[in-house]
């Protein structure tokens, strides 16, 4: 079983501040391990909602004054705090809650220093930015997942089909003579290609991949258990 991660969370509050996203963020992170640090950096000193939000979610606020006009003081402070975490050996994972792709070089630097880096953001986060992280939490997708009775069924179908296309390619390149591919390998490869892959994005009640394949994707794939190992096979028409 994978060891529980020791997590520090840095929130770009000027960028990531909707109250409904915080419970989702921390619930998802709790599945990775223990959250040891919760910092939020903000520049809007007139925001009267900050105290209640931060108290409710156990977040330590860090106000940051912009000393120079036109410079993003919050980004600089976030980077400083992230760099300071490199010296804390009890922290092995850093979460950056922001949609700002300017943090991409910081993500790579943290990874080069043996930190597992998780991103978190809404639908404004670009795919290129999400792919820089070891894993990404799409809080908006989880808060508004695609439901079977989604009003925009075409959108749901398109997104499911995009997911199926990715899975098909993985299976096609790694199946045996019986067209079976190791299920664990398929899921791990999918997560490496889609850093924000999460069954919850598609309306599942949890992030477990096996029941997701057996329910939402059961028209596309058959799950086969051989002794204690699961395999997945494409259903061809």
Image (cartoon, rainbow, N blue to C red):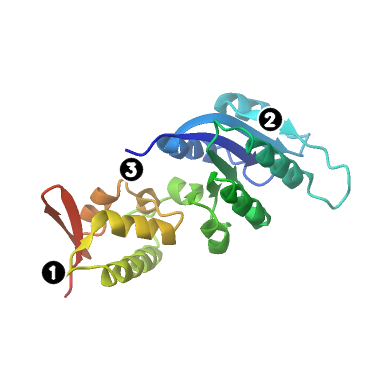
In screen coordinates, is 217 left or right of 61?
Answer: left
Spot occupied by residue 197 in the image (x, y as percentages of width and height): 41, 54
Which type of secondary structure does the marked residue at label 1 adopt?
loop
Query: Label 3 crowding class (10 Å Cα cut-off): few <14, some 14-19, many 20+?
Result: few
Which type of secondary structure does the marked residue at label 2 adopt?
strand
Dot 1 or dot 3: first in sequence order is: 1
Q: Which residue shows up at 47% across the image and 39% down it?
A: 24
The quarter in which the C terminus is drawn is: bottom left
Dot 2 or dot 3: first in sequence order is: 2
In screen coordinates, is 77 left or right of 193?
Answer: right
Which residue does the numbered mark 1 point to in the structure image? Answer: 178
Query: Does 126 sit above or below residue 52?
Result: below
Taking the image as drawn, is residue 234 in sight?
yes
Which residue does the numbered mark 2 point to in the structure image? Answer: 61
Query: Does 129 sit above or below residue 25?
Result: below
Instruction: Determine the image quadrant of residue 76.
Output: top right
Q: Which residue shows up at 52% across the image and 38% down it?
A: 92
| Of residues 164 and 119, the one drawn nearer to the viewer in this rendering | 119
Q: Nearer the viewer, mark 1 or mark 3?
A: 1
Tell me the distance, in whole angstroms, between the alpha carbons under discs 1 and 2. Answer: 56 Å
Count numbered badges in the picture.
3
In screen coordinates, is 77 left or right of 93?
Answer: right
Which type of secondary structure does the marked residue at label 3 adopt?
loop
Q: Which residue shows up at 38% across the image and 55% down it?
A: 146
Instruction: Determine the image quadrant of residue 205.
Output: top left
Taking the image as drawn, is residue 219 in sight?
no
Q: Which residue shows up at 58% across the image and 30% down it?
A: 37
The quarter in which the N terminus is drawn is: top left
Which residue does the numbered mark 3 point to in the structure image? Answer: 206
| Of residues 70 and 107, the one drawn nearer to the viewer in this rendering | 107
Q: Nearer the viewer, mark 1 or mark 2?
A: 1
């Amino acid at each position: 079983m994978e060891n529980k991660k020791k997590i520090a969370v840095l929130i770009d509050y000027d960028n990531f501040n909707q109250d409904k996203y915080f419970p989702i963020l921390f619930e998802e992170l709790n599945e990775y391990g223990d959250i040891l640090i919760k910092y939020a950096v903000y520049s809007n000193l007139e925001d009267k909602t900050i105290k209640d939000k931060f108290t409710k979610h156990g977040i330590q606020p860090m106000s940051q004054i912009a000393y120079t006009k036109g410079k993003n003081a919050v980004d600089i402070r976030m980077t400083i705090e992230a760099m300071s975490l490199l010296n804390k050996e009890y922290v092995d994972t850093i979460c950056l809650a922001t949609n700002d792709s300017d943090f991409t070089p910081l993500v790579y630097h943290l990874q080069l220093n043996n930190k597992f880096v998780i991103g978190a953001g809404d639908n404004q986060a670009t795919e290129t930015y999400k792919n820089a992280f070891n894993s990404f939490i799409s809080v908006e997708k989880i808060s508004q997942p695609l439901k079977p009775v989604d009003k925009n069924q075409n959108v749901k179908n398109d997104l499911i089909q995009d997911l199926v296309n990715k899975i098909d390619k993985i299976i096609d390149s790694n199946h045996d003579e019986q067209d079976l591919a190791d299920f664990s390998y398929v899921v791990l490869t999918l997560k490496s290609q889609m850093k924000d892959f999460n069954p919850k994005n598609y309306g599942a009640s949890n992030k477990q991949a096996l029941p997701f394949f057996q329910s939402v994707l059961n028209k596309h794939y058959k799950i086969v258990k051989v002794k204690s190992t699961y395999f997945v096979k494409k259903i061809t028409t």
